[in-house]
Amino acid sequence: MEVTRERAWATLTSYTKSEALLRHALAVEASTRFYARLWSEDEVFWGCTALLHDFDYEIHPTLDKHPQDGAPILREEGYPEELIVSCLSHAEHLELPRDTLLKKTLFACDELSGFIHACGLVRPTGLEGLEPKSVRKKLKQPSFAAGVHRDEVYAGAELLGLELDKHIANVVSALQPIAGGLGLRTATDNGS
């Protein structure tokens, strides 16, 4: 089966109806694609993997089922094993090796994309002008975006061999072009 964005989006939206989860998938896709471009990797394949990493979360919202119970669904739909294992590898509790650049990148982009999205939601300018130091300050506030695993944010940057500020700046850059689709204010909303 050829992995296409249209096919991945169809799979995602047949199992995921929550706007928040769809926006998370789009954010992780944009971040992962950013790195695929940066490192001359297969942008479509990486993006589709990112779109599908949480596709089963609505039907399997607990760690004893997500994402492992989603894997047979992806296999049945004909997705390649590389995509499926990469999706599985984002889950800390499965303790799978992150032994490819795609697996490392998906893990590194998952929590940080969600956190940066949350930062953009509380700013009058969305992601415009969002600096790494502001994101780091928010990371130190446990009550802000409390569902985000901070240890995974730090571990993700380390896994990619990047300074946290550089990784934050990259993810902010990756999300800016899709800010409107993520429900964030954009320069045009602000009258700029």
Image (tube, rainbow, N blue to C red):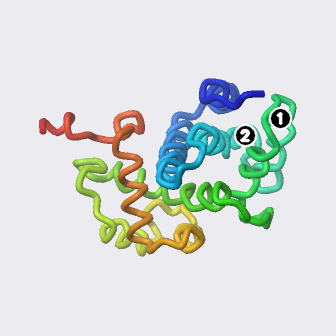
Q: Is residue 92 above or below residue 69?
A: below
Measured as percent of width and height from the top left, residue 57 is found at 69, 43
Screen quadrant of the C terminus: top left
Q: Find the residue positioned furthest to the left.
A: 192
Of residues 112 and 139, the one drawn nearer to the viewer in this rendering: 112
Q: Is residue 191 above or below residue 154?
A: above
Circle 2/circle 1 CB separation < 8 Å: yes
Measured as percent of width and height from the top left, residue 141 is found at 41, 72
Screen quadrant of the N terminus: top right
For residue 32, side relative to residue 87 (left or right): left
- SS of the residue at dot 1? helix
Identity of the residue drawn at 54% across and 43% down: 29
2 vs 1, front mark: 1
Q: Amino acid at mark 2?
A: Asp
Tag 2 residue: 56
Q: Quadrant of residue 69?
A: top right
Measured as percent of width and height from the top left, residue 135 is found at 36, 66
Identity of the residue drawn at 45% across and 67% down: 143
For residue 17, side relative to residue 171 (left or right): right
Q: Is residue 78 above or below residue 105?
A: above
Q: Residues within 10 Å of mark 1 (few under 14, many from 20)?
A: some
